[in-house]
Image (spheres, rainbow, N blue to C red):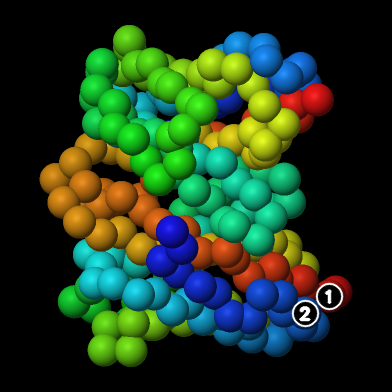
Amino acid sequence: SQQGEEDPQALSIQEGENATMNCSYKTSINNLQWYRQNSGRGLVHLILIRSNEREKHSGRLRVTLDTSKKSSSLLITASRAADTASYFCATASGATNKLIFGTGTLLAVQP
Amino acid sequence: DVKVTQSSRYLVKRTGEKVFLECVQDMDHENMFWYRQDPGLGLRLIYFSYDVKMKEKGDIPEGYSVSREKKERFSLILESASTNQTSMYLCASRLRWGTLRHEQYFGPGTRLTVT
């Protein structure tokens, strides 16, 4: 079952612009994580935000979490061509913190 | 850095064959996972293992089994491959339960085609 749903499904921007991706989920969570996947490769963990946190930063990444709306957003500032990838949110729930992934946002950064 | 390796990047098998996908991690992680990734469906959990010789079904275990005889190695077995098991298979590991280190580390994936 899908927990996270990303929006938009695809996004195309110019280098230097900011990219914002949104994730909505259905049930209560322990934490929410964002991953990046370059074409045809494995996923790379980007950032984790816990359910009691509202905002977190890591380099050019900014993640927000609104548990009342069951939603999160990932902002990539000053995007680069190398940021071109698919981005997935994943929610961790329950005693095992099993991850449930969304369907992803495909980001294309044009040089 | 954690390194997770998978035995093959591409694999082509025939319907009915028994298929083994191997995954090895080198950072003494206790938890390991197998996912499959299909367009429009994201990643779905097939099986996971908390520790050696332990396994739990994920969301789509039908047609698959797993083996974890050593801590560093987690194998996914397709008992009798079918065309609907054509997919990208991703292995991941995580440090352990009960820590604050919840992130998972992924291998490069195996693209399996069943003909």
Residue highlighted by disc 2: A12
Q: Tell me: A12 left or right of A96.
A: right
Contact flag, marks 1 and 2 (Cβ < 8 Å): yes
Point out the image quarter for the N terminus of chain B.
top left
Q: Quadrant of residue B104?
A: top left
Report the amino acid beneath label 2.
Answer: Ser
Label 1: state its secondary structure. strand
Give the crowd class for mark 1: few <14, some 14-19, many >=20 residues within 10 Å: some
Q: Is residue A13 left or right of residue A66?
A: right
Q: Residue at x 50, y 40 (%)?
A: B35
Q: From this viewpoint, which residue is outermost toward the right? A: A111
Figure label count: 2
Q: Which mark is residue A110?
A: 1
Task: Using the image as rendered, state which of residue A10 and residue B26 is in the foreground.
Answer: A10
Whether residue B93 is visible, yes or no, is no
| As drawn, A98 above or below A51 | above
